[in-house]
Image (cartoon, rainbow, N blue to C red):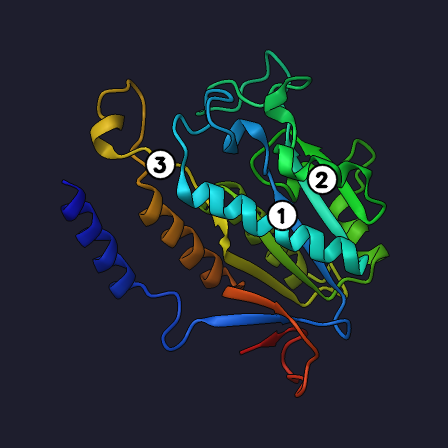
Amino acid sequence: MVQAEQSLVDLVKQEIPIHQSEPESLVLSDDIKTGLVLVDIVNGFCTVGSGNLAPVVPNRQISNMVEESVKLSRTFCEKKWPIFAFIDTHHPGKPEDPYPPHCLIGTDESKLVPSLQWLEDEPNVTIRRKECIDGFLGSFKDDGSNVFVDWVKTNKIEAILVVGICTDICVLDFVSSTLSARNLGLLAPLKDVVVYANGCATFDLPNQIASGIKGAVAHPQELMHHIGLHMAKGRGAHVVYEVSLGSIKEPRSNSSCCYE
C-alpha cells in the first residue's frame, strides 16, 4: 500500500511539476523590504495530541516546517525585519465546517507552538488572530480596515515570504487572496509573494484511515502538500526550496526578490 501511494505521488510530481527546470531559491537582502508571514503555526495544528486537528504522532513534515519557521523568525528579528503571524482562533458555538472544533480561544490549541511563543514580545511582530481559513479575509476589522493590508503599507513591504500550515488550505487560501489583492492594486508596494516549500506542511489522513471515519475525506500528506504548492505557483506565487541571506548582485527588472 505504501509503495503504491508513493508511486502515485511520484507520478503526480512528474505530471504537474512545480518547476520545469531547477527549483528556485530565494536570497534575502536589506535592499528589498521583505516581510515574513507565519500561517497558523499553533499547537492545535502542530503539537502532538493538542486537539482534534493536531497530529496524533510525531510528524516529520510538520516538525521540519516548525524548525524552518523558527530559523527564519530569528533571522527576521535579528534584522528587525517585519513579521506577521496568523493565529487560528475560534469561539465556542461558531463552527468552521467541515472541520471539528479546534483552536478555541483561551486554550493551548490557539497558542503559537512553544518554540515560537517568544515572538509575542518582539517589537517587529504583528499578531492577528483569525476565525476563518483565509488569513487575508480574517484580517478585516469591524470598521472595514484590514490589518494585513495596513501592515504591508505601513512597512512598505515589497515581498512576503510565507510559511506555515496547511500548505493546501490556510496557506493556499491566504496566498491566493493576497495575489488577487495585489493584482487589483490594493497592496502597493507589494510585488512578490514567495512560498517556502520546506517551511510549509499539511496534515496526513491516508485513505485507509479516512475510509473508516464517517464524513472524512482522504488527505495524503505528501500528495496534498505538492498540490498546494503547485496551486500557489499557478496563482502567481514564487515557490522556493531554499532561503538564504546575502546581497543582490544583479537586481532583476521584473522582480523585487532575488531568485537563483
Number of labels in the image equals 3
Is residue 229 shown above or below 217?
Answer: below
Q: Quadrant of the N terminus?
A: top left
| Position of residue 240 measured from the top left corner of the image (x, y, whole percent) | 50, 65
| Camera-side mark, 2 or 3 | 3
- Checking the image for residue 180, the label placed there is none
Q: Which amino acid is tagged 1? A: Val
User: Few, some or many C-alpha atoms within 10 Å of disc 2 (few <14, some 14-19, many ≥20)?
Assistant: many
Q: Circle 1 — which element?
A: helix
Q: Residue under circle 2?
A: 139
User: Few, some or many C-alpha atoms within 10 Å of disc 1 (few <14, some 14-19, many ≥20)?
Assistant: some
Question: Which residue is painted at 27% across and 27% down in the image?
Answer: 210
Q: Residue under circle 3?
A: 204
N-terminal of the pair, mark 2 or mark 3, is: 2
User: How far is disc 1 from disc 3 in space, using C-alphas?
Assistant: 22 Å
The answer to whether marks 1 and 3 mark residues whose Cβ atoms lie closer than 8 Å is no
Left or right: 11 as drawn, with respect to 103: left
Q: Is residue 259 visible?
A: yes
Question: Which residue is painted at 76% across and 62% down in the image?
Answer: 157
N-terminal of the pair, mark 1 or mark 3, is: 1
Question: Which residue is painted at 67% across and 86% down in the image?
Answer: 249
Q: Which residue is at the front of the view, 18 or 26?
A: 26
User: Few, some or many C-alpha atoms within 10 Å of disc 3 (few <14, some 14-19, many ≥20)?
Assistant: many
N-terminal of the pair, mark 2 or mark 1, is: 1
Question: Which residue is painted at 70% across and 57% down in the image?
Answer: 75
Left or right: 141 as drawn, with respect to 258: right
Left or right: 22 as drawn, with respect to 76: left
| Camera-side mark, 1 or 3 | 1
Q: Would you identify the image quadrant in which residue 27 lies?
A: bottom right
Q: Which amino acid is tagged 2? A: Ser
Q: Residue furthest bottom?
A: 250
